[in-house]
Image (tube, coloured by chain):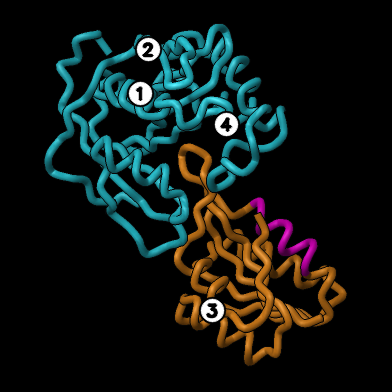
Chain colours: A cyan, B orange
Amino acid sequence: MSDRSYPTAAIEVGTRPPVRFTDRAGRQIAIRQVTDADDAVAALTAMYVAFDPVDRAQGIPPSEPAQITAWLERIITTDAVNVIAWDGDRAVGHATLVPDGDASELAIFVLQSHQEAGIGTRLLSALLGAGAAAGIERVWLSVERWNHAALALYEKVGFEVCETAGFEIEMSLRLPASDADDGL
Amino acid sequence: MRVVCGVRGTAASQAGLERVLTGWLTAADTATVLLLDADAQTEAAAADAAAASAATVEVAPLSPRTGAALITAATEADAEQIILAGGRRSPLGKIQLDRLTQYVVLNAPMTVTLVR
């Protein structure tokens, strides 16, 4: 998939995590970048165990707790960028950039109880901010055609459709070159 | 039952490959294993599985290596099912069905089983 095309212009990235805000349901939400992989895997395993199968996408998250943990351990690595939305001590949203050659693949999940409250938009924005700071410039994702809410969210932050031939739509985005101001 | 198995040699499809060759060749009476860009190791695995199976098994390369050719071959073999080892995963773990697999699923007149 190295022939994927990316927009020539970079998007303007938003605020990097940590981000705190009140969601549309009045909950205090904190978005933080993952620094401790073990803690993140534990908190996100709990979140994904509670995840409604209807919101699975192309086989992720897996359905069984052990598979969920194994999947998280593969994507929460030092060269990936992961951010988590917290409602108190409970993980309610997760977004990730996983290395794929000279690009990164993006995915985002928000727990059903916390959807349609503005968390996804902030989480995605925080992830892209963290990704740009980590030196990532090319981001791609795939999304199922019928997932109009996700398509709208991705377009809002600047993703452009780059492949429509298959069952899924592929989208890509370019992040601004990093100043590498955090030493990554 | 007559089946046509499409077998590809990429490392990512090896898990499915094993189940295609052990499971489906045992279940079939007559099978054709079509090799699609299969490497030598996969070709040898297909030959071994064919020899070990009680079914009548033919192993042949598919040319051209397209979904249309696979469906034509399955139709000519009077197959009831096409069995495909398919489903790579993206770096993030999302299942990706390549164009050939998608073409076969959408266009084959017979049942298509994806082994993942």
Secondary structure beneath dot 1 equals helix
Query: Of callouts 1 and 4, which one flags the residue occurring earlier in the amino acid sequence?
Result: 4
Q: Quadrant of residue A183?
A: top left
Going 49% across and 72% down the picture, which residue do you hit? B103
Is the residue marked by circle 4 packed among few (<14), some (14-19), or many (20+) residues within 10 Å?
A: some
Percent across and percent down for residue B73 are 59, 86
Q: Is residue A43 left or right of residue A28?
A: right
Task: Mark 2 vs mark 3: give the one in front.
Answer: 2
Task: Please name the amino acid that badge 3 sits on.
Answer: Asn
Q: Which residue is mark 2?
A: A21
Which residue bears the numbered disc 1?
A: A122
Q: Quadrant of the C terminus of chain B?
A: bottom right
Mark 1 → mark 4, Cα distance in angstroms? 16 Å
| Left or right, residue B37 beside residue B47 | left
Residues marked 1 and 4, same chain: yes
Label 4, on which residue? Answer: A112
